[in-house]
Every structure is written in C-alpha cells, then in structure tokens.
Image: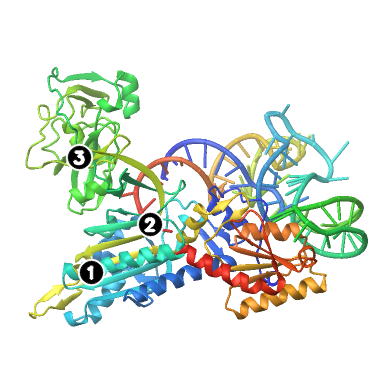
Amino acid sequence: MRYSKLLIPTTREVPSDAEIPSHRLLVRAGYIRKVASGTYTYLVLGLRSLRKIMQIVREEMDAAGAQEILMPVVQPLELWDRTGRSADYGETLATFTDRHGRGNALSPTAEEVCTFLASQELKSYKQLPVNFYQIGTKVRDEFRPRFGVLRSREFIMKDAYSFHTTPECLDVTYRAMYDAYCRVFERCGIPYVIVEAESGEMGGSGSHQFTVPCENGEDVIVHTADGEYAANLEKAEVDPPLEPFDRGAAEVEEVHTPEVGSIEAVCGFLGTQPVEMIKTLVYKADEKIVICLIRGDHELNVEKLTQAAGGAHIEPADEATVREVTGAGIGFAGPIGMVDKVATMYVDPWVEGMCCGVSGANKTDYHVKNVVPGRDFPTEADNVTVIDIRNAVEGDTRGGKELLFHRGIEVGQVFKLGAKYSKKLDAYVDDESGASVPCIMGCYGIGINRILASAIEVGNDKDGCILPIAIAPFEVEVVALNTDSESVFSKAEQIYNDLQAAGVDVLIDDRQARPGVKFKDADLIGVPLRVVVGERGLAEGNVEIKRRTDDKPAGVPLDQAVERILEIVRELKAGDK
RNA sequence: CGGAGCGUAGCUCAGCUUGGAUAGAGUGCCGCGUUCGGGACGCGGAGGUCGCAGGUUCAAAUCCUGUCGCUCCGACCA
C-alpha cells in the first residue's frame, strides 16, 4: 500500500493522558485515536495488526477443532439474571432497556448465550464434545478505563466455549486449548508465562492464565525461583506460619482510641505495628453475613474468600450492616463475641498463629489489646473456618520456597467451568444410558488488542515500536528517498511491485517528504524490515536493507535486492516462532 | 464511588496568584521560495464563543457558584 494514500497520522508529541509506552506509541505511530474514555478508533495500521493477530488465533482455534460462530453483542438480560451474573458483574455489565421495556446487556463475554445455544441444539452425547468460538467486540463498563487499549471499555476478544459429558472429556479439550494458546502466543512473537489462576466470576474449578511479563502489567504473578510453582496473585497459595507462637499473654484490655478507625491510625495512636493487629472485615456472602480475620499488614483476597464460601457472591457489607452486626462504627470491629452473630467466621492461618493481637472492641472509639486467638475467640467451631484468605506478600513461601513477584499483562485465560451454566440454563444432554446430564463446560479467552499492546510494551525503543513480523501492520517498508528523482522512484516502485507479487505485505513511502521525516516515521511505525532506495545507494548500484533491530543498514546490489528481502522476511518469520 | 487535579489554537502548553487594551509560544496545517540521507529554513496566511451556564464587577481566560467532560491515585478487573 502507498503511504501517500493512507491516513497514518504520526505525531511528535503525545496526548497528555498516554502514560505507558504501548499507549503512547500506538497513538504516536498512528495506530489508534481515542474517541472517548476507554474507546478507540483503530486506523489502518492498528487494524492491520489486529487482523493478523485474529488470523493467527483463528487458524490455531480451527486447527484445535473449534468451530467459529458469531454471537450477538446485545443479549437478553434475562439470561444473565438466570445465571446470577447480572448481579456478579454489577455495574461493569453495560445494560439498557429497549423500547419495549426489555432488559438487555452488552456482552462482556458470552457464556450465557453460548450455553443457551447448547440448550437449544445439543440433545445427545453423540453431539459432544463441541467447542464454539467467536472473535468480536466485547463491552465492559469499566469503573476506570486506563492504559489506553489495555483496559478499555470496548475490546476485541476471542472467546470459546466447549461442552462435554465427562470431566475427562473436558480435560482433553482444555489441554488442546492450552496448547493452542501456546502456539498462538509463540506465533505472535510475544513472551509469555503460564500461571495457575482463580476462575473468579466465571465460576469454575480450574484455570490457567497466560501473561506477558512487563512492568506496566496490571496483574501480579507469583512464582518460586525454580518455576515449579507459578500463579497469579488471586490464586497464589502461601504456607501457614512455621512455628506456633507463644500464647502466654495477659488478659484482654480495652483501650480508648477515639476516632482512630484505620489500621494506620490505630498504630499511630497506640504505638503498635500493623503486624500486631487483627483486621476484622465484615462481608456479605450471597445474603449471609460473614467476617474475615486477617493480620493488619495483610490484604484480603476476595477470590480466595469466594472459594472458601463455596462460590458465593462476595461483597463488602454496607456501613449499616457493619454497625448492626458489630454494634460499632466502621473501624472498630473485632473478633471477640462475633462468632454467634455471623454465618461464618473465616480466620486466616496467620491470625490463628498470632500470639496475641490488637483488634477493634466492637464498640465505637475502643480497641482491645492482648487478644489471643483460641482463647478470646474460637478458632475451632462449626461456623469457624481457618483458611488462607489473604494475598501473598513479599517474604511468603509456598512449599518452603520463597515466592517472587512480577507484573504482567493478562492476554489469555482458560477455565474449566463445570456445570454451573448448563444447570442454570438447562443445557442437558442424554448420556449413553439415556440419563439426562448437564453439559460440563470449559471456556477460553484471548484479548486480541492486548496482544498488540503487550507486544509494543515489550518491544519498543526511543525511536518507536519494534513489532514481531507476524503481527506488524506491514512486513516490509520501501522508502523511496528522493521522490522527484525518476530513477529512484521507478526502482523503488519496481521493488515494491516485485515484493507484492511475491506475497509480501509491503508499504511504500512514496510521500514527498524529507528523508529525515521518512526515517523517523519508519522507525516509529516499527515495520520489521526497511528498504531504502536513494540516490546515494543507487550511485553504487545498491539499495539499503535494515531490520528494525539492526544498528546500521546493509547495502545490497539492486538486482539482488528482492531476493535478499524475501530471504530476510523468511528468516524473521522463522525467528518469531 | 472516595481522594487529587485539569479543561486556553488540531496537539503540547504559557497567561490566572495580584481582573484592564487586539489572548500568546512551540509544533502541526495552507501558500510561495530556497532546501533535500535522520522530524530543514525564510516570508506570508488560516485557525480561539479561553468546556458550558449563571453570578460579582465599569470591566472576567483570570474571582465566586453550579454543571459537564477528562486525567491521575485508591477501591472485586478480559
């Protein structure tokens, strides 16, 4: 394609809202333009890259036995109500009421619709297993869009849903998807790690997350140095305390702590450390009130709590509920005497292991000291569960090995869903014995735009993008330096035509612009291979070929240029895999 | 939703504290000329209801109130 005919609005300056490299460069290189918060128009370069990514995904999904379909973005809210996910998603689910008064959701994912399809069409075990996938726009009314295309309100996702009669059959497809994902990311030329993940709102029993390690990622991955264990922060398990602590503490003592509700404030007031505090959090698990005890310097892990509560929908209790349950204002909840007032009390092992601690007194403006787990509140009772419900932190171990933390961008995740959706949406089939059984499901997502953004996040330098050839908008850029020189222009055109004929994705910079401008733009856009045709080179019978990652161009005789370019393109493609 | 901040030329920003004349710069854009291998230079030009609505004032980009939008930090994330 001809640069002079395309809208490739490169800029020297960046909009002030772009903070991370991928966002800055996508804008500067003219791949995208923002329309509103969290929504973007993809211009020719951006769309070409997305298409290449989608094609790779499509090929690997097809090869893995999935079949492509297309489901609606506008979905009946009723289906979401039936699975309970309209509540789980909350305001993140974008909804509208149509002119007939019907509720509709804009799809952030499509378990409901796909399961609905299964319920209508799948009747017999003989039809299974099946795996449906689609590539399309998803909508989430994000509480806070950010990082450009990485966390937007609208994005492109490949989502797939598989149906099975047995867990073993699901395992086979799950593994096939897992392997397909590895091939997708390898072909896209981006580095990735696979970690164990929690299935979260999806509701399921097993999951792996594919993450591109990089500084600006929003996900935290946790692993041991030997790589034997790797999980995301939501999932990462931590060892319980090694040594049981000395329990020889004094009697419980109430202290007046006026208007100091937060951990920091209490510590400042009493001169204690967060590690000595017992943090008491009131939550609602479905409609039941539960409390969670974690050490003051730890954070509650909602995913772990969800699992502990048997998959219940977890949300923080509102202030009125907290007051009613504890009899005190926010910030003064404590464990003593609470066990009878709540459905369940979850105690983190690191609280159980405390010698004694400071907690709220369930009395506004008061805390209590010398609270001993097991003595002053039960750690063993019918409705008390001691279980890991906090985020892993620096210094934690797992299996005795130190846990290390890194950030990453989630680009894909695979889930075993079980029968949650099929039961709620009546997706049952007859098995071999004639019994009606709910389909066992898996689901598998890939963030298409995130692959592009993360590729730039890990591939850039001061001059611009450095994209793998597999997903770059063009494979080769021919730069015609002196466009008013007939010989330069015609030779550049000849190379351009020959490359096109050879099936190469080639861009020719045929603009009437100064050389510096063309060089800068070529670097910024990040086309993997640049071919310069200029008077200086032609005087020696050469054109210049430079990979985006090379320091200097190499002169190649004009008559060998196309052949050499094709060779390097082949090498680059092989190298990316 | 809580905290902070910002809305002035297409973009990046000055001006606002301490109200005052035709609202500025860089970059980008248009025209002419000179240039032509790493974002050239000269001359000329277009481009602004200073987010919007009220208010204070002889006078508002500037002060006050409201409102809308955006951004950053935090709060259950593909």
N-terminal label among 2 and 1: 2
Left or right relative to A54: residue A19: right
Q: Nearer the viewer, residue A529 or A328?
A: A529
Q: Secondary structure at mark 1?
A: helix
N-terminal label among 3 and 2: 2
CA separation in Å, label 1 and label 3: 39 Å
Please tell me whether residue A214 is drawn above or below residue A393 in the rendered image: below
Query: On the image, numbered disc 1 is attached to which residue?
Result: A172
Q: Amino acid at mark 3?
A: Ile
Left or right relative to A505: residue A341: left
User: Is label 1 on the same chain as label 3?
Assistant: yes
Q: Which mark is residue A341?
A: none
Q: Quadrant of residue A258?
A: top left
CA separation in Å, label 2 and label 1: 33 Å
Q: Secondary structure at mark 3?
A: strand
Query: On the image, numbered disc 3 is attached to which residue?
Result: A291
Q: Secondary structure at mark 2?
A: helix
Nearer the camera: disc 2 or disc 1 = 1
Left or right relative to A265: residue A509: right
